[in-house]
Image: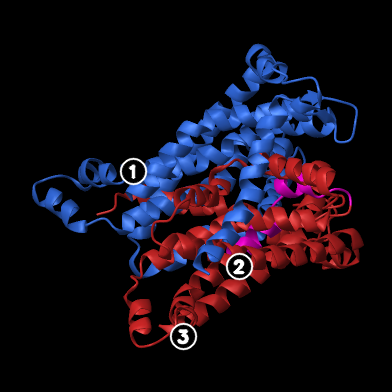
Chain colours: A blue, B red
Amino acid sequence: MRVALRLVPGLWLALLVAAPLALVFVLAVSWQSNGVPPYDPPWAGQGTNPDNLRLLLEDPYYRASLAQSFVVAALTAGLCLLLAAPMGIAIARAGRWRNALLAAVLLPFWTGFLIRIGAWIGLLRDEGWINAVLRGLGLTQDAIPLLYTHGAMLLGMVYAYLPFAVLPVFAAATRLDPVLEEAAADLGATPGHAFLTVTLPQLFPALAAAFLLVFIPAAGEYVIPELLGPPDATLVGRVLFQEFFQNRDWPVASALALALLALLTGPILLFQRLGRAQ
Amino acid sequence: MTPRLVRVLLWGGLAFLWLPVVLLVGYAFSASSVPFRWGGFSLRWFAALAANDRLLEAAWLSLRVAAGSATLAVLLGGATGWVLARHGAFAGRSLLGTLAGAPLVLPEVVTGLSLLLLFVALEGATGWPAGRGALTVLLAHATLGTAYVAVIVQSRLATRDRDLEEAAQDLGATPAAAFATVTLPLMAPALAAGWLLAFTLSLDDVVLASFTSGPSGTTLPVALFSMLRLGMTPEVNALATLLLAAAALTLGLVGLLLRGRD
């Protein structure tokens, strides 16, 4: 009975997590075809196809796409952290306002991710709210192009991922012992100095976890670059969609997925270690 | 002892999070057909929303997919979390834990692509699932949801030691009775939270649904995404207002329920 109870989740996860990932590996060494489905696996007669993975290493387009994704993900995670660290700490210390402030961070989430990104489209367009305000203040005559820029994309990414970064910092900050900071003050440290030398170092694992919690999904982000970014923001999520849906090149799309996964293995393992350590 | 700069950044961050939401709600009641321009008070965009059959159909499908996938995720994720927390060491335990946690850290484009490849290969080999639609989206969302529920249930059970279950068995309960009367009530808050989280994730997902949906399974986020690619409309403001109202109401109710228990 107990063994049977282990088998049910085991089989479900084997079928819907392990098998699909194994198929990505198979597809990455398969051949594109005109059939349905549009690929020939290695055992269909042609053997394994090394060209998909070689293409990623040799073609500057794919290399640049992977590099750009990691730069954008790092910028997103860094900017999120700059806001999330003070927010998480301040909320943890807000006393009876703590729950209300935490709800204030999480509630915008419930409008739906797409709708909040849609709101930024309305705010950033040439005839949108921000340009109207700038014109009203007499700061500009012509509309400043804001939407479909790298800046808009980064803004949208930081906006979407910020609450994820606040939570781990908040959780760690609630566990801090205030006595340590008081001791620093008694020994003559100014509040700012005590904060920087006593409080912040204790939060370092949580800050690293918050950074990775944003960095990992941001590296594969598809929706935000597509809706807010310029056409040349060819992040890997976007290129993968394009290869899969427009070019119907499933093997190259799978090779890209594999490359993204390989590059994220280090950050993912580090993130899991930080999670266990807490 | 919190430096002033920290508090300033808190209010700045909150303003940043709320600005688009507040404007969204305010301008949902504007008569202007340009989003975020004031044209006098009007409910016309709520009326337009009520007449948009494509969007309503997608919303109804999304609700059913979200409810179905969240329920499946609670059953399977609950079992996974319980096995991981309560079965001690057994062969394959660490593999089970790795597989259960994988969807949490995989980029969604990788999960989406891999699940589509599975459904296509399965159809080629067995004829099932015939084509892709609501069912395949539901299975994809249930896979992601299972991972979240498993983590929540496992960590909930890990903070409660096994004395209670053992005491029940010492007092003569069969293992099944001990599970039903002791373990299950311990897991219940985690199962409820997991269901809500899985439901929300499903209602918000574009990427998994894009890969696994096919033409007959257009969920609300997929429909919205194709609308937003062409630009924003005031109808979306109205939809956002309704969703936010529903969310605030739910959150308020949950808060009241939790307060009643303490």
Percent x, y for residue A211?
Answer: 45, 40
- Mark 3: few/some/many CA within 10 Å (<14, 14-19, 20+): few
Identify the residue position indicated by label 2 in the image. B75
Asked whether, in this view, residue B135 is left or right of residue B100, the answer is: right
Q: Nearer the viewer, mark 2 or mark 3?
A: 2
Could you say which is closer to the camera, residue A179 or residue B47?
A179
Could you say which is closer to the camera, residue A266 or residue A112?
A266
> Which region shows up in magenta?
B197-215
Amino acid marked by disc 2:
Leu
Identify the residue position indicated by label 1 in the image. A205
Q: Give me the chain letter of mark 3.
A: B
The answer to if B214 sits in the magenta stretch is yes
- Mark 1: few/some/many CA within 10 Å (<14, 14-19, 20+): some
Number of numbered tags placed on the structure image: 3
Amino acid marked by disc 1:
Pro
Label 2 SS: helix
Confirm whether residue B43 shows in the render. Answer: yes
Amino acid marked by disc 3:
Gly
Residue drawn where x is 79% and y is 23% of the image: A31
Q: Quadrant of residue A125?
A: top right
Image marks 1 and 2: residues in contact by CB distance under 8 Å: no
Identify the residue position indicated by label 3 in the image. B260
Q: Give me the chain letter of mark 2.
A: B
User: In terms of secondary structure, what is the magenta stretch mainly?
Assistant: helix
